[in-house]
Image (cartoon, grey):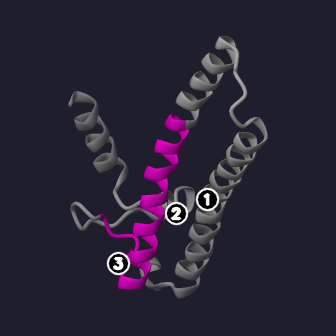
Amino acid sequence: MADWSMDKSFIEQQRGRLQALRRQLLGPELAELAKERAEREVRGDEPREFEETAQEMSETEVHQALHDVDNRRLKAIERALQKIEEGTYGISDISGKRIPKARLEATPEAILTVGEEADLEHQQRRM
């Protein structure tokens, strides 16, 4: 049986999934920027209520947290696409170990094994 990491149809399927994920992540962000710009143009310099400003600040905090998560995921997607080009897709960036096919099917942007990712997250939380 052929090694899955060399299966061109699997790699091409993953490339398509990664590209679709990238478009999905970038789409809402661009729409949100356009919406904010339009609101500023309509509102101009008119005074705003304290509650309105507080609500916007709260929404901005939530959007920033989501944006940070999306940025991390987008970087992983870009790295996975780069690994496809390099011929190293499915190989961990840290250890060089194989990433199980089931993990790649569930998370096509995976560039680390589950254990390595858990260790990295644990280290980052301790900082």
What amino acid is found at the position of numbered circle 1 in the picture? Answer: Leu
Kindly check if marks 1 and 2 are in contact, taking CB atoms under 8 A apart as contact.
no
Residue 28 point in image, percent of width and height = 68, 52
- Quarter of the figure with residue 39: top right
User: What secondary structure do most residues of the magenta stretch adopt?
Assistant: helix
- Checking the image for residue 108, the label placed there is 2
Give the residue displayed 56% in from the left and 76% down from the top.
15
Question: Against 85, is 14 above or below?
Answer: above
Residue 81 point in image, percent of width and height = 46, 74
> Which residue is farthest right?
42
Question: Against 93, is 85 above or below?
Answer: below
Residue under label 1, please give it: 26
What amino acid is found at the position of numbered circle 3 in the picture? Answer: Thr
Task: Determine the secondary structure under disc 2.
Answer: loop
- Quarter of the figure with residue 44: top right
Foreground residue among 82 and 9: 82
Residue 1 point in image, percent of width and height = 47, 84
Task: Determine the secondary structure under disc 1.
Answer: helix
What stretch of residues is rendered in magenta? 64-92
* Position of residue 57 in the picture relative to residue 5 (left or right): right
Residue under label 3, please give it: 88
Give the residue displayed 39% in from the left and 70% down from the top.
90
Dot 1 or dot 2, earlier in sequence: 1
